[in-house]
């Protein structure tokens, strides 16, 4: 790799930030040669977290981590200094934090009687077990674009296992059977402890402050250019010797049209698609606006590149059915400890140790999680923040007579308190900010292998894709790890780096793990 080469990263998500770090650390590319072009005013993409006690905090989601997997993520963060503990890496501080605050959920499922469901059994019938075994033996080309419902009987979706697994990972019955199988294999280690979430690890703060900010700070110190308020609208390219070569980047920077020349030897990394594209926030008095890709244009570049180039994938497989790929989350800011006090008494868990609490009989299939406090570095004492989400926001609530999609923050809190049998006074001063995400599980949509391009597609000389919408064998989408692994794969390929990429740990091939899962399945 010529150290005079420049690299342009379109999109400021965790994948682009990771790619920049790998180019510097492992490719010896000077940070000053790297530019990250981001349409928003802040880096981090889907790993967001913002707000204050007065206006309310907001997070679109909270990715769960594990130190038993996430090989590329920890390979990266062992190199990134902590902002909270001088002399330690982000990996070090995360491990230490989780040693102090271990996950051991004592209220993973709650039923309509407000009773904690004792999960001594997965609830499987022999037919469920046989169907799971059959799915595990089928190859991905046979599974192709089938959905989970194509492989399981209706009773499977009423098991305790399904309520826990689907809400832990945000699966819906019509999602991809391939992705479901990959999750079963990748997280087989979690199968035997899914009711306690013992394998789940958390960051000290929300993931913007714990993962994005330290990485961005390190990249800034290396001289990387962060170009905010810069929306890339098109790529110029030519074909030479049968290869596509990007030659220019068109963008709107602070509202003005610009063109960046991409010279010989320069590289371009594109975030193709986004699971948080066209997301919108509501308030205590307003439901979130119902946006689509037409409101943001976040899929446009990939759609243009893929037209007539099957090796660049098929975006339509993922962004053509909002009805099957959307759900809503909400972030609640409290200035009164009574809600947290009541949850501690009810669940038996201190904040940061319980993980998800799912209301299995909720029409919305609502879950909440109380993180260790404070969840934001600027969070004052006496203020608490928690997050929740619902997989079926198009259904009418149990306590609020309309779909979640039409509810404001106050109505969502009323529905939540109804399930918990908490007095509304416990959330009297709360600020609940709902968030609608039309493409949040678009990467789970049924698809065939060719619908996702490789990180560096055949026939591409200087263009790579980094996102949840590239094809990486054996790994699972909807994880930080997938974006980081895609970044590492793309960078090593285009820069010719010979360092080994950490392989996916084959937990599913461990006899001990298989035995533990088998015992759990037959309880």
Image (tube, helix red, strand yellow):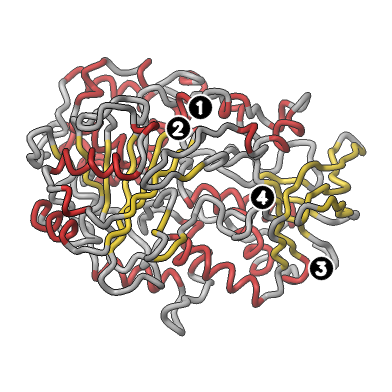
CB atoms of marks 4 and 2 within 8 Å = no
Task: Name the residue located 14 percent from the left edge and 43 percent from the top edge.
Answer: 420
Upstream in the sequence, badge 4 or badge 1? 1
The location of residue 501, given as percent across then percent down, is 57, 55
Q: Would residue 319 be found to the left or right of residue 242 on screen?
A: left
Task: Name the residue located 45 percent from the left edge and 71 percent from the top edge.
Answer: 90
Q: Nearer the viewer, residue 23 or 248?
A: 248
Q: Nearer the viewer, residue 265 or 359?
A: 359
Camera-near label (4 vs 1) is 1
Upstream in the sequence, badge 3 or badge 2? 3
The location of residue 38, given as percent across then percent down, is 67, 55
Q: Nearer the viewer, residue 2 or 49?
A: 49
Q: Which residue is mark 1?
A: 322
Secondary element at tag 3: loop
Alpha carbon distance from label 3 to label 2: 43 Å
Camera-near label (4 vs 2) is 2
Q: Which residue is mark 2?
A: 326
Alpha carbon distance from label 4 to label 1: 29 Å
The location of residue 26, given as percent across then percent down, is 65, 66
Seen in the picture, residue 22 relative to 92 is either above or below; the reply is: above
Which residue of the protein is positioned furthest toward the front in this rendering? 285
Q: Which residue is mark 4?
A: 490
CB atoms of marks 1 and 2 within 8 Å = yes
Q: The C terminus is located in which quarter?
A: top left
Alpha carbon distance from label 1 to label 2: 6 Å
Camera-near label (3 vs 1) is 1
């Amino acid at each position: 790799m010529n150290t005079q080469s420049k690299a342009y990263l379109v999109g400021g998500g965790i994948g682009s930030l990771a790619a920049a770090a790998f180019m510097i650390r492992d490719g010896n590319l000077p940070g000053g040669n790297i530019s990250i072009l981001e349409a928003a005013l802040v880096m981090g993409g889907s790993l967001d977290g913002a707000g204050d006690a007065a206006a309310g905090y907001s997070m679109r989601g909270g990715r769960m981590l594990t130190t038993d997997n996430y090989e590329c993520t920890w390979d990266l963060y062992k190199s990134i200094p902590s902002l909270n503990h001088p002399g330690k890496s982000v990996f070090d501080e995360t491990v230490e934090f989780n040693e102090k605050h271990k996950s051991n959920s004592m209220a993973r499922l709650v039923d309509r009687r407000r009773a904690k469901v004792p999960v001594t059994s997965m609830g499987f019938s022999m037919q469920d077990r046989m169907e799971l075994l059959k799915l595990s033996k089928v190859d991905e080309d046979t599974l192709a674009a089938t959905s989970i419902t194509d492989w399981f009987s209706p009773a499977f979706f009423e098991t305790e296992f399904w309520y826990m697994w689907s809400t832990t990972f945000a699966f819906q019955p019509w999602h991809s059977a391939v992705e479901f199988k990959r999750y079963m294999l990748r997280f087989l280690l979690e199968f035997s402890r899914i009711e306690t979430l013992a394998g789940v690890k958390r960051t000290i703060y929300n993931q913007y402050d714990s993962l994005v900010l330290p990485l961005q700070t390190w990249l800034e110190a290396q001289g990387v250019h962060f170009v905010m308020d810069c929306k890339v609208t098109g790529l110029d390219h030519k074909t030479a010797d049968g290869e596509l070569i990007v030659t220019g980047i068109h963008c709107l920077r602070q509202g003005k049209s610009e063109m960046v020349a991409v010279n010989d030897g320069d590289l371009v990394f594109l975030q193709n698609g986004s699971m948080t594209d066209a997301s919108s926030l509501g308030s205590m008095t307003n439901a979130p606006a119902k946006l689509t890709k037409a409101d943001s244009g976040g899929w446009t570049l990939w759609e243009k590149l893929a037209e007539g180039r099957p090796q660049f994938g098929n975006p339509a497989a993922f962004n053509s059915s909002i009805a099957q790929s959307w759900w809503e989350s909400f972030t609640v800011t409290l200035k009164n400890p009574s809600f947290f006090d009541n949850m501690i008494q009810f669940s038996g868990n201190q904040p940061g140790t319980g993980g998800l609490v799912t209301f299995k009989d909720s029409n919305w299939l609502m879950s909440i999680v109380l993180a260790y406090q404070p969840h934001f570095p600027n969070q004052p004492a006496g203020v608490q923040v928690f997050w929740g989400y619902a997989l079926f926001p198009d259904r009418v609530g149990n306590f609020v007579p309309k779909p979640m999609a039409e509810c404001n923050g106050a109505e969502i809190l009323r529905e939540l308190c109804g399930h918990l049998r908490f007095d509304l006074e416990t959330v009297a001063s709360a600020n609940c900010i709902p968030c609608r995400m039309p493409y949040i599980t678009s990467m789970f949509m049924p698809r065939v292998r060719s619908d996702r391009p490789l990180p560096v597609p055949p026939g591409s000389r200087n263009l790579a894709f980094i996102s949840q919408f590239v094809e990486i064998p054996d790994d699972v989408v909807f994880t930080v790890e997938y974006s980081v692994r895609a970044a590492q794969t793309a960078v090593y390929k285009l820069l010719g780096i010979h360092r080994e990429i950490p392989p996916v740990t084959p937990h599913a091939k461990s006899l001990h793990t298989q035995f533990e899962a088998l015992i759990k399945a037959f309880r």
